[in-house]
Image (cartoon, rainbow, N blue to C red):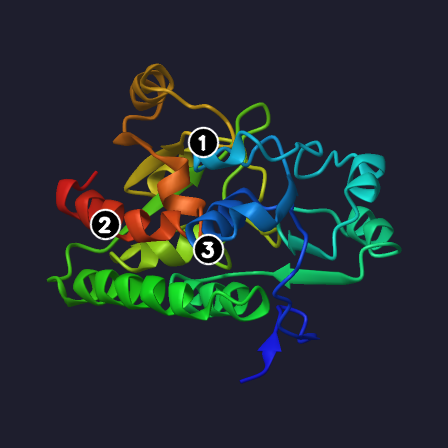
Amino acid sequence: MKLLDALGREHQPAPDARIVSLVPSITELLCDLGLAQQLAGRTGFCIHPADMVASIPKIGGTKDVNIHKIRALAPTHLVVNIDENEKPTVDALAEFVPNIVVTHPLAPEDNLGLARLMGGIFCANDEAEAWCAAFASELAQLRARPKGRACTVLYCIWQDPWMSISSDTYIARMLAEIGWSVPQLGEARYPRFDWSDELVAGIDGVLLSTEPYRFTETHAEALEKQIGKPVRLVDGEMMSWYGSRALAGVRYLRQLAQDGL
């Protein structure tokens, strides 16, 4: 089987790879596949699993990357994501990192291909297949449950300005698994919006994510009073992190559907 990344570029197995990961969720996946010793660098947002990443050098954030630090680490492979990392930065790193592995999961089932890609490139196939079996089982259980009432929810990721998600995102497709859809607020994948009577009338409720903006129950209570619709705080990691955390994310979705708005 060819090891093709999100840009269709083929990669070869690299048992002695030195990896820098610019994607927090994939850093966690690599650790869970037994590859922590091969991680030469990670972002400051790569916080899971805490005991493993503590000793891995930080190279900045997902967007404000320290190129000089990465060069000094002499990685053979850089793992990036189309949504999370900026192309000019990746292009600059590609001048001295031989292998750029581009990822772009858009739906829960894409986690299977992601795990197999990481396992295939970095020679952890058995670990990847074990993870895939566990994830496929959880996803099948979610899909086998009786479908609840379909509803439209506004999923908020930021305020000042207010920002949401489009239907063409991993989060939206996670929500679609339980019959919840998001309103289309324009062409952008992560659109800005203003509260209006028309917008509020077209939704059943609001989900405030705990990341990237740190919404809290206080925000949820205040907004619920403001718009007169149910507002619920949701765990951003469970909803948006693919890779390892998606296993718990599918279970979280099942509970979210059970609890409702």
Q: What element carries label 1?
A: helix
Residue 48 visible in image: yes
Separation (CA) of disc 3 from disc 2: 16 Å
Q: How packed is label 3: few (under 14 Cα within 10 Å), some, or many (20 or more)?
A: many
Identify which amino acid the numbered label 1 is placed on: Ala
Q: Is residue 153 left or right of residue 47?
A: left
Q: In this view, does 175 lie to the left or right of 33?
A: left
- Which of labels 3 and 2 is toward the front? 2
Up-down: is 85 above or below 117? above
Up-down: is 227 above or below 128? above
- Residue at numbered disc 3: 170
Residue 42 occupies which quadrant of the picture?
A: top right
Q: Where is residue 246 in the image (x, y as percent from the top left)?
A: 36, 52
Up-down: is 246 above or below 216? below
Separation (CA) of disc 2 from disc 1: 22 Å
First along the sequence among labels 3 and 1 = 1
Residue 183 visible in image: no
- Residue at numbered disc 2: 251
Q: Is residue 261 left or right of residue 116?
A: left
- Residue at numbered disc 1: 50
Q: How packed is label 1: few (under 14 Cα within 10 Å), some, or many (20 or more)?
A: few
At horizontal 28% and vertical 26% (from top left) the residue drawn is 228
Identify which amino acid the numbered label 2 is placed on: Arg
First along the sequence among labels 3 and 2 = 3
Q: Is residue 156 left or right of residue 137?
A: right
At horizontal 61% and vertical 30% (from top left) the residue drawn is 44
